[in-house]
Amino acid sequence: MAHVKEKPSDKLTAFERYQELNARQVAKYVGVETTKSVWVYVKEGKLPQPRYLAPHKPIWRLGEVLDHTHALMQAPSKAVQGFKGNELQESQRTSKSKVKLLKERLGLK
């Protein structure tokens, strides 16, 4: 049998995985000051494209953001340099501690 690679979002509950984040919350997660930086990261492929609940109402799912940023941290490239999420890779934190850190940053219990 082929080994299925576990995603970081697999450690989240269903409620947490589908938690909807606005641009301000995503900015807080990736460690930037403005939502403009979030849109720059989306354009550069450092963050996933948002979903839209209504026109001009973008949301991101926590599990998608976590999986997308985790994948970039596992295979760093020149395109990822300067992305503030890289401190997680440098310290070699486990997926479990990444989830804990994410919850702390977003103010989740």
Image (cartoon, rainbow, N blue to C red):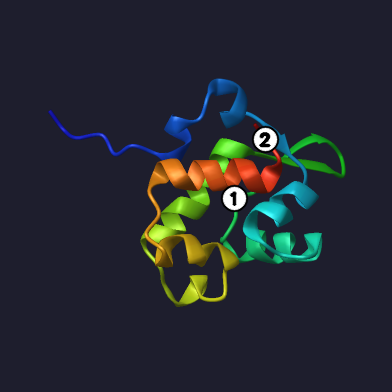
Kindly report which numbered mark, 2 or 1, lies closer to the viewer in this rendering: 2
Q: Position of residue 4 (x, y in %)?
A: 26, 34
Q: Where is the C terminus found, in terms of image quarters?
A: top right
Q: Where is the N terminus found, in terms of image quarters?
A: top left
- Of residue 102 and residue 21, the one placed in the foreground of this image is 102
43 on left or right of 13: right
Q: Position of residue 105 (x, y in %)?
A: 66, 48
Residues at marks 2 and 1, CA–CA distance in whole angstroms: 21 Å
Q: Residues within 10 Å of mark 2 (few under 14, many from 20)?
A: few
Point 50% across, 66% down: residue: 87
Q: Which residue is mark 1?
A: 48
What SS does tag 2 mark? loop
What SS does tag 1 mark? loop
Residue 55 visible in image: yes
Q: Amino acid at mark 2?
A: Leu
Determine whether 48 is above or below 42 in the image: above
Q: Earlier in the sequence, mark 2 or mark 1?
A: 1
* Quadrant hosting residue 36: bottom right
Q: Which residue is mark 2?
A: 108
- Of residue 53 and residue 82, the one placed in the foreground of this image is 82
Q: Position of residue 55 (x, y in %)?
A: 87, 40
